[in-house]
Image (cartoon, rainbow, N blue to C red):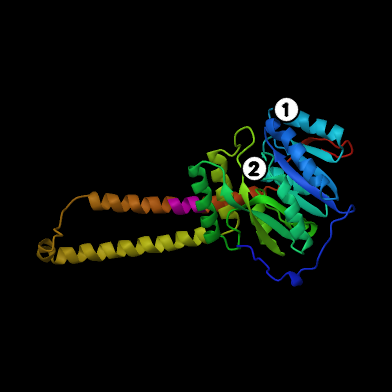
C-alpha cells in the first residue's frame, strides 16, 4: 500500500491562488448522455477553487456525439480542451493522452460518468496544500452489482499480494497529483500504462481519501469483462515478476509430487500384499499415467502462458510505436 505520511509538519505547505493552474483530465468513450451533467458539476466545483484551470476531455474513439459536444464546450469556454484519439485505445491510454497534454501545476483525474464526484476534488486540493504530492480516492463503498464488487475486491488484493511495490487497496485513477509526479510518470515508457500502478511506483508523498463511489448517472459501463481482465493482467504483469517465480515453485512442487508418486509405486510393487491389506491394492492400468500426464501438461501450459504474457509485453515495448495517435484537437495551434 502507498506510504501515508502521518506527520503534517514534515510537508511543506502550498497554497492555491488565481495563478495556480489546475488541469482536470477526463477520458470519454460514448459519454454523450452524461457530458452536460459533468460540465455543470465540474464547472461549479472549479469556480469554488479560486484558481485558473483547464479541462482536458479525451475522446477515446467514441461513436456517438461525444466529440461534437466536446467541441461545443470548447467554443463556449476555451479552457475546456478536447483531444480526439484516432480509435479506441482504452481507458488507461486515454488518461495518458491527457497527462501528456496537461500543463497545470496540479493535475486531477476523474471519470466522465460522475461516479467520481467532482465536488470531492476540493478536498483533494486541500490535502495537496498540506504538502501531499498525490491524493488518491479510496472506494469505501461501490454502487455496483455484488458480482462486480467482489471481482474488484479480489483483484486489488491479488495485485497487492503479487506486486513488488505498494499499490493502495481499492484505489482507482480518481486522484490529484502534483506537477512533479506527472513529470516523473511521463519518464516511463510502457506501451500499456497502468496509471494507478505508475502513480504508486514513482513514489513521493501520498495519502488516500475514502469516498462513496456513486452509480452511473446515465448509460452503461464501458468496461466489459474482457477489458476488466485486460486491466487486471496489465496491472499484475507490469508491476510484478512473482508469477514467474510462482511458475518455478509450481514446477518444483509438481516434481516433488511426481517423485513421491514414483517412490510410492516402487514400494507398492515391492510389498503388494502389505499395501493390499492397508487398502491400497496394486491395480494395473493407464489411469494413473493419464492423470499424471494431464496434470504435468496443464502445469506446463500455465507456465508457458505466464512466460507468454511477459514476452508479449517485451514485444510491444521494443516495437517503439507511439502509445496513441490523436486525429483532432480543439486547439487550432496544436498539432494532431
Question: How many labels sit on residues?
Answer: 2
Q: Residues within 10 Å of mark 1 (few under 14, many from 20)?
A: few
Q: Is residue 32 left or right of residue 212?
A: right
Residue appearing at x 43%, y 50% in the figure: 301
In reply to whether residue 304 is colored magenta, the answer given is: yes
Nearest to the eye among marks 1 and 2: give it.
2
Q: Position of residue 47 (x, y in %)?
A: 83, 45
Vertical order, 98 against 126 (above or below): above
Q: Position of residue 146 (x, y in %)?
A: 49, 44
- Write down the residue under mark 2: 115
User: Does dot 1 land on a helix, a strand or a loop?
Assistant: loop
Q: What main secondary structure does the magenta stretch of the protein show?
A: helix
Q: Residues within 10 Å of mark 2 (few under 14, many from 20)?
A: some
- Callouts 1 and 2 close, C-beta under 8 Å: no
Q: Which residues are magenta?
A: 302-306
Q: In this view of the protein, which residue sits in the foreground, 193 or 207?
A: 207
Residue 66, quarter of the rendered image: top right
In reply to whether residue 207 is colored magenta, the answer given is: no
Residue appearing at x 38%, y 63% in the figure: 253
Q: Which mark is residue 65?
A: 1
Residue appearing at x 76%, y 55% in the figure: 125
Vertical order, 156 against 131 (above or below): above
Amino acid at each position: 500500500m502507498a506510504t501515508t505520511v502521518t506527520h503534517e509538519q514534515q510537508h511543506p505547505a502550498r497554497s492555491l491562488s488565481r495563478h495556480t493552474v489546475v488541469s482536470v483530465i477526463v477520458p470519454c468513450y460514448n459519454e454523450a448522455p452524461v457530458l452536460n451533467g459533468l460540465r455543470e458539476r465540474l464547472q461549479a466545483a472549479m469556480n469554488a477553487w479560486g484558481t485558473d484551470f483547464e479541462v482536458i476531455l479525451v475522446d477515446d474513439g467514441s461513436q456517438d456525439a461525444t466529440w461534437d459536444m466536446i467541441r461545443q464546450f470548447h467554443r463556449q469556454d476555451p479552457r475546456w480542451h478536447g483531444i480526439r484519439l484516432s480509435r479506441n485505445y482504452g481507458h488507461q491510454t486515454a488518461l495518458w493522452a491527457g497527462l501528456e497534454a496537461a500543463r497545470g501545476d496540479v493535475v486531477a483525474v476523474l471519470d466522465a460518468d460522475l461516479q467520481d464526484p467532482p465536488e470531492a476534488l476540493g478536498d483533494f486540493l486541500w490535502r495537496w496544500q498540506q504538502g501531499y504530492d498525490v491524493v488518491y480516492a479510496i472506494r469505501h463503498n461501490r454502487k455496483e452489482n455484488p458480482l462486480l464488487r467482489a471481482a474488484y475486491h479480489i483483484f486489488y488484493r491479488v495485485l497487492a499480494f503479487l506486486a513488488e511495490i505498494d499499490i493502495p487497496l481499492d484505489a482507482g485513477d480518481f486522484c490529484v497529483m502534483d506537477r512533479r509526479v506527472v513529470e516523473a510518470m511521463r519518464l516511463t515508457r510502457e506501451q500499456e500504462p497502468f496509471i494507478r500502478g505508475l502513480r504508486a511506483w514513482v513514489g513521493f508523498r501520498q495519502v488516500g481519501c475514502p469516498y462513496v463511489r456513486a452509480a452511473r448517472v446515465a448509460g452503461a459501463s464501458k468496461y466489459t469483462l474482457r477489458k476488466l481482465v485486460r486491466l487486471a493482467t496489465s496491472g499484475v504483469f507490469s508491476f510484478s515478476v512473482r508469477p514467474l517465480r510462482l511458475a518455478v515453485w509450481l514446477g518444483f512442487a509438481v516434481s516433488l509430487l511426481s517423485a513421491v508418486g514414483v517412490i510410492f509405486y516402487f514400494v507398492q510393487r515391492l510389498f503388494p500384499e502389505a499395501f493390499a491389506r492397508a487398502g491400497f491394492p496394486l491395480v494395473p492400468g493407464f489411469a494413473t499415467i493419464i492423470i499424471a500426464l494431464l496434470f504435468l501438461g496443464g502445469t506446463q501450459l500455465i507456465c508457458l502462458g505466464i512466460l507468454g504474457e511477459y514476452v508479449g509485453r517485451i514485444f510491444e515495448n521494443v516495437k517503439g510505436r507511439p502509445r496513441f495517435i490523436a486525429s483532432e484537437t480543439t486547439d487550432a495551434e496544436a498539432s494532431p
